[in-house]
Amino acid sequence: MSIEARIKSRELRNARAVAERRRKKRTCLIAVGGGLIIVGLLVAIVISLISAAGNGSSPASQRGKAPAIATVGGALGLGNAAAPVKLEVYLDYMCPYCGRFEQANSGALDRMAADGTVRLELHPLSFLDQASSGAKYSTRAANAVATVADRAPGKVLALSTALFTNQPEEGSRGLSDEEIATLARNAGVPADVVAAFAGRSFEPWVAASTEAVLDSGISRTPTVKINGKVFEGDLYTAGPLMAAVIAAKGQW
């Protein structure tokens, strides 16, 4: 082989070697880059999960601050927790049918809660916010009741009765904040508790509880359950509901 041929052969081998080194380098860079992408994706997923947990993605945390006597189911628990009958009442302070229910049954319910016959669980809802011309009366009234439940629970039923006795017409703007406060003061709610209405601390709880009730399949107020079963009898005449409660007590 001539000198020129040997030189060309060596140059060809060198060129091939350089090309091979470049190929290996590219392969290495691709592998590293792909690995970094995968690691980055994993880190992003972990951060997302941690962030979701930290932001309170559980149903309980979404409800916000709950009144001191609130139940896990989003009600205000009144009376003896060990009573033989649990009576759940789903109501909206703008609902005229709830007003009729209150007029027919509130006296007997109050007595049965006081004497330990029933564990009364009130669900103050905001179903009819859209029926108060943008004033969110249902939410504001429910927030007031929840505030009393948190700080003066012995006055919950007195305020609830006062709100229904002075119930505004469906479709109106409802009672003003000052009118709600006046009713509360007249019902014996302490002044510092009435002043706390303005903070609207329990409006997120009212909203979340209302959503949970809708999700459970309840779509109208009033709805009444006796020991977990919906009462299908007459809600607007004094007597039938109490008879059903007494019957349930006898089965206890």
Image: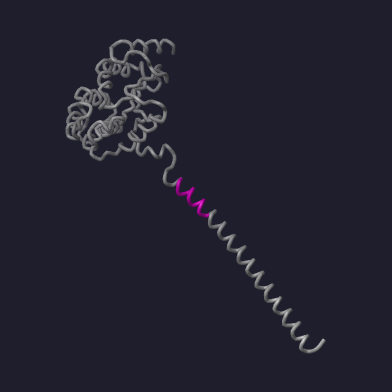
| Residue furthest out toward the right | 1
Q: Is residue 138 above or below residue 18?
A: above
Q: Main secondary structure of the magenta part?
A: helix
Number of numbered discs overlaid on the protein picture = 0
Was residue 212 drawn as part of the magenta stretch in this picture?
no
Q: Is residue 200 visible?
A: yes
Q: Position of residue 77 (x, y in %)?
A: 35, 26
The residue lying at 31 percent from left, 28 percent from top is: 124
Report the side of 62 relative to 145 (left or right): right
Q: What residue is shown at x 30% (from left), y 37% (from top)?
A: 203
Instruction: Note whether 117 is above or below 187 in the view shown.
Output: above
Whether 10 is drawn above or below 84: the answer is below
Q: Position of residue 233 (x, y in %)?
A: 35, 13
| Residue 214 x %, y % | 38, 29
Going 37% across and 33% down the picture, which residue do you hit?
Answer: 211
What range of the chain is rendered magenta? Answer: 43-52
Question: Would residue 148 be visible to someone looking at this image?
Answer: no
Q: How is the image coloured?
A: one colour
Which quarter of the figure has residue 144? top left
Q: Is the C terminus in the top left, top right, bottom left or bottom right quadrant? A: top left
Q: Is residue 71 left or right of residue 138?
A: right
Whole-percent x, y for residue 57 in the image = 43, 42
Q: Quadrant of residue 239?
A: top left
Q: Residue at x 38, y 25 (%)?
A: 218
Name the quadrant of the N terminus. bottom right
- Residue 231 quadrant: top left
